Amino acid sequence: MTLGCQPACRPNSNAALEGSPAPRLPHAPADWQSAGWEAPKRLGAFGKVDLKPGEARSVDLTVDPRLLATWEAASNKWTIRAGTYHVLFGQASDELPATVDVTLPDTSWSAASRER
């Protein structure tokens, strides 16, 4: 089973100088505490792209499913709890202007399993 997120974003350079924006992709369950998360959001992926002034380019980012999961020691499994997850896009943790909600099913896999 493959489960994760593969969003794409399109950073652009509005500056007069060349730059290297680093798009970030934090994510979080709508109710992070009941999902068993230790923090309100996690950094799922990031990238870096070199841009010339006024240029825009698509960047594909992939979130490893383990970054959407919590470790359940009692069952020795990774678990993604069913629900709505917010995928946020931006260039800094305090500057996340775009959000997309995705709904994920309840999923778990063994620590010994290579398949997700």
Image (tube, grey):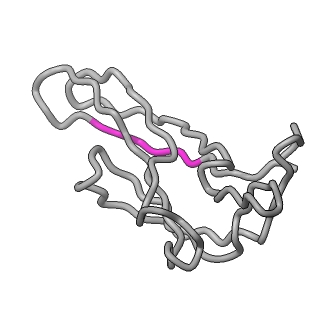
Q: Is residue 28 left or right of residue 102?
A: left
Q: Position of residue 38 (x, y in %)?
A: 47, 62
**Residue 8 part of the magenta segment:** yes
Q: Is residue 107 above or below residue 34?
A: above
Q: Nearer the viewer, residue 40 or 8?
A: 40
Q: Is residue 77 left or right of residue 100?
A: right
Q: Position of residue 111 (x, y in %)?
A: 81, 45
Q: Nearer the viewer, residue 98 or 111?
A: 111
Query: Magenta residues?
Result: 7-12
Q: Is residue 26 above or below residue 47?
A: below
Q: Position of residue 74 (x, y in %)?
A: 78, 63
Which residue extends farthest front? 74
Which residue extends farthest left? 16
| Residue 64 position by quadrant | top right
Q: Is residue 56 above or below residue 73?
A: above
Q: Is residue 12 left or right of residue 39?
A: left
